[in-house]
Image: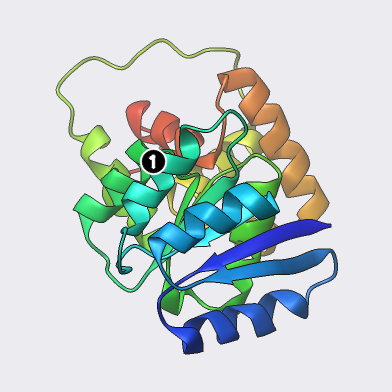
């Protein structure tokens, strides 16, 4: 069971997230916080697996709350969910230790996928943001780094799709394979590249000129 804490100053948003998540098998909402201070307090008391953290909250914003929790010995996995598509927020969230960054209009499916990815130790960033953050790597004037353990043609297809911001379900549909096959390819890719999550896989693709 994935235990989730919702941290957002808007009760309507928390209610919507709770309805979406509690309809999923294996997901339980264990608490709600309306301020950053409450988010930190409840996370330390309830010990959720995943915290969905808004950025703009009273008393303590989501970035500071994330930094506070990441300083703990056993921090939860934190996914920042916000209305504001600002690069400074994305960079700030990831530097603070968040394992995901999602826009509130991303839709129920991506919200659930972000929670499951976080619980599994992976990272998920809204597709449009992923592409924007990583495109600058393609323009670097430095030479391409040497390729590590060679990837198979299908693994390269998966890497390119990840770099374009596709979700696992979208990759499966594009490549006409099952979702479990996509997950297997991603596991193999992470092992070969030494990547911890899909953000690092995407960075690899841009750095090696696999996408433009």
Q: Residue furthest bottom?
A: 12
**Foreground of the two, 136 or 10:** 10
In the depicted structure, whether residue 83 falls above or below residue 37:
below
In the depicted structure, whether residue 8 falls above or below residue 128:
below
Q: Residue furthest left?
A: 141
Q: Residue 204's quadrant in the figure?
A: top left
Find disc 1 in the rendering and name its residue.
Answer: 67
Quarter of the picture holding the C terminus: top left
Q: Secondary structure at mark 1?
A: helix
Q: Would residue 3 be seen by someone viewing this image from the given angle?
A: yes
Q: Position of residue 198 (x, y in %)?
A: 54, 41
Residue shown at the point (61%, 63%) measured from the top left: 5
Q: Position of residue 192 (x, y in %)?
A: 63, 19
Residue shown at the point (18%, 27%) measured from the top left: 140
On the rendered structure, is 64 left or right of 69?
Answer: left
On the rendered structure, is 16 left or right of 138?
Answer: right
Instruction: Identify the colour scheme used.
Output: rainbow
Q: How many discs mark residues in the rendered view?
A: 1
**Foreground of the two, 140 or 59:** 59
Q: Residue 128's quadrant in the figure?
A: bottom left
**Foreground of the two, 109 or 143:** 109
Q: Position of residue 51 (x, y in %)?
A: 57, 56
In the depicted structure, whether residue 5 falls above or below residue 152:
below
Q: Residues within 10 Å of mark 1 (few under 14, many from 20)?
A: some
Quarter of the picture holding the N terminus: bottom right
Q: Position of residue 206 (x, y in %)?
A: 35, 35
Residue shown at the point (32%, 58%) measured from the top left: 60
Q: Would residue 174 be seen by someone viewing this image from the given angle?
A: no
Residue shown at the point (48%, 85%) measured from the top left: 11
């Amino acid at each position: 069971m994935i235990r989730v804490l919702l941290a957002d100053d808007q009760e309507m948003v928390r209610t919507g997230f709770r309805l979406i998540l509690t309809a999923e098998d294996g997901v339980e909402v264990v608490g709600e916080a309306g301020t950053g201070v409450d988010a930190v307090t409840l996370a330390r008391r309830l010990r959720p697996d995943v915290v969905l953290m808004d950025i703009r909250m009273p008393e303590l914003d989501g970035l500071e709350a994330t930094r506070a929790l990441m300083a703990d010995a056993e921090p939860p996995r934190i996914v920042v969910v916000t209305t504001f598509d600002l690069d400074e927020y994305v960079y700030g969230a990831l530097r603070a230790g968040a394992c995901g960054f999602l826009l509130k209009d991303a839709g129920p499916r991506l919200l659930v996928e972000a929670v499951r990815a976080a619980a599994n130790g992976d990272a998920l960033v809204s597709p449009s943001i992923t592409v924007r953050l990583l495109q600058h790597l393609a323009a670097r004037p430095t030479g391409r780094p040497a390729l590590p353990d060679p990837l198979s043609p299908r693994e390269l297809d998966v890497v390119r799709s990840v770099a374009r911001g596709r979700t696992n379900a979208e990759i499966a549909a594009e490549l006409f394979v099952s979702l479990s096959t996509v997950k297997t390819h991603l596991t193999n890719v992470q092992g070969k590249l030494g990547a911890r999550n899909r953000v690092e896989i995407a960075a690899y693709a841009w750095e090696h000129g696999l996408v433009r």
